[in-house]
Image: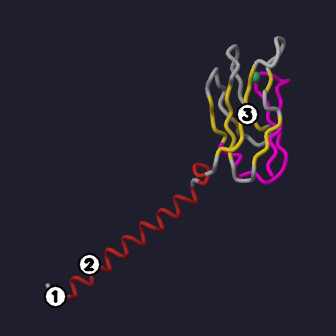
């Protein structure tokens, strides 16, 4: 065992560290939604006796953030679906929550969401 072996194993260790660091970079880029901050809250509730509604019909977040949907209506299930975008929360019973991570990929603008069970339940997500 000379100094050559020591240098070679050090080089191997450095290479392993570099591979590890680049793998972390790749994984980080593949799942930005997990790192995105939950900033907005969409809340469904029994707004009045006749029909359920979103207690937060207008939700504002900054670009790159996500929203959390919570059903606070003890009587019925609700969801928050982004019409035309093909994603939304799950259909939830009281008092469950679901993070809608896909909104982190949206551009600035106004996006409508609605409940798939109640046609009059609508809201807007504004991304600034
Ligand atoms: Cu509903």
Coloring basis for residues: secondary structure
Above or below, 28 relative to 42: below
Which residues, given as a range, are shown in magenta?
101-128
Between the C-alphas of marks 2 and 1, the distance is 12 Å
Disc on the earlier residue, 2 or 3: 2
Q: Characterize the local packing of mark 3: few (<14), some (14-19) or many (20 or more) Cα atoms within 10 angstroms.
A: many
Q: CA distance from mark 2 to mark 3?
A: 55 Å
Whole-percent x and y of residue 109? Answer: 84, 50
Quarter of the render that holds ligand 1? top right
Give the residue at mark 2. Answer: 9
Q: Quadrant of residue 12?
A: bottom left
Q: Secondary structure at mark 2?
A: helix
The image quarter containing residue 107 is bottom right
Residue at the left extreme of this rendering? 1
- Asked whether mark 2 and ligand 1 are closer than 8 Å, the reply comes as no
Alpha carbon separation for disc pair 1 and 3: 66 Å
Q: Which mark is residue 42?
A: 3
Q: Which residue is mark 1?
A: 2
- Residue 10 painted magenta: no
């Amino acid at each position: 065992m000379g100094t050559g072996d020591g240098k070679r194993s050090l080089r191997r260790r450095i290479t392993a560290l570099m591979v590890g660091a680049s793998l972390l970079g790749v994984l980080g880029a593949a799942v930005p939604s997990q790192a995105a901050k939950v900033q907005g809250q969409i809340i469904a509730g029994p707004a009045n006796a006749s029909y359920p509604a979103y207690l937060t019909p207008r939700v504002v977040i900054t670009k790159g953030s996500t929203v959390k949907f919570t059903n606070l209506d003890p009587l019925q299930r609700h969801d928050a679906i982004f019409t035309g975008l093909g994603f939304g929360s799950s259909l939830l019973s009281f008092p469950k929550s679901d993070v809608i991570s896909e909104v982190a990929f949206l551009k600035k603008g106004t996006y409508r969401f609605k409940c798939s069970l109640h046609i009059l339940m609508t809201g807007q997500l504004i991304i600034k």
